[in-house]
Amino acid sequence: MQERTEGDDERLGHLLMQVSKLLRDRVHTHMEAIGLSRGQGFILFRLGHQDGLPQTELARQTMVRPATLTEALQRMESAGLVERRPDSADGRVSRVYLTPNGETARRAAESIWDEVESELEALLSPTERTGLRTLLGKLRAGLEGRP
């Protein structure tokens, strides 16, 4: 364990969790205003980049358990935002597609992500943003067990 030094008031993990919670809460407030949960906005965002993802891959990309994703997709299907269809080559695989209403909601959610991203970028210089992206990517890869 690394020794803490004077002036080192916060552990890195605690600080990252606090920033993550503040960001999560900010996104949640904006998503709620358009009738979505934070998770639904992220699901729509991912499908906007690759519609028709297999459900298991969507769970991986959104970093949620498959059962949690299934519950979210059931609510989203009921709301007319997505539809699940069996894969044409493998009927055991369920693919998730945006509906026209889902595409409209996706655009609104993407605007929210753009707004929050702009707020974050305004807090840092271009050099700080580049460095932070590099460091956060390195931490993510390490925590995922990748080199």
Image (tube, rainbow, N blue to C red):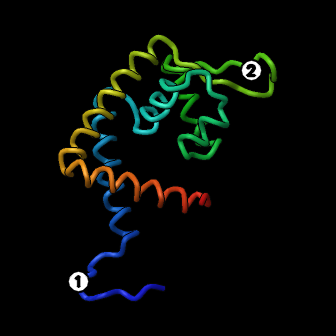
- Image position, residue 110 (x, y; %): 35, 28
Classify mark 1: residues with Cα within 10 Å, few (<14), some (14-19) or many (20+): few
Give the amino acid type for the residue marked by disc 2 in the picture.
Answer: Asp
Q: Is residue 15 above or below residue 41?
A: below
- The quarter of the picture where the C terminus appears is bottom right
Q: Which residue is mark 2?
A: 87
Residue appearing at x 28%, y 40% in the figure = 117
Locate residue 65 relative to residue 90 in the image: left or right: left
Residue appearing at x 41%, y 23% in the figure = 106
Residue appearing at x 61%, y 58% in the figure = 146
101 and 134: which one is in front? 134
Query: Quick one: SS at disc 2?
Result: loop
- Real-space CA distance between mark 2 and mark 1, rounded to the nearest whole angstrom: 56 Å
Mark 2 vs mark 1: which is more N-terminal? 1
Q: Which mark is residue 106?
A: none
Give the image quarter of residue 5.
Answer: bottom left
* Callouts 2 and 1 close, C-beta under 8 Å: no
Q: Is residue 77 above or below residue 15?
A: above
Numbered-mark total: 2
Give the amino acid type for the residue marked by disc 1 in the picture.
Answer: Gly
Q: Is residue 135 above or below residue 108?
A: below
- Image position, residue 88 (x, y; %): 77, 16
Considering every residue shown, the one lying at the far front of the view is 127
Query: Quick one: SS at disc 1?
Result: loop
Locate residue 139 relative to residue 9 in the image: left or right: right
Q: Which residue is mark 1?
A: 7
Classify mark 2: residues with Cα within 10 Å, few (<14), some (14-19) or many (20+): some
Nearest to the eye among marks 2 and 1: give it: 1
Residue appearing at x 46%, y 33% in the figure = 40
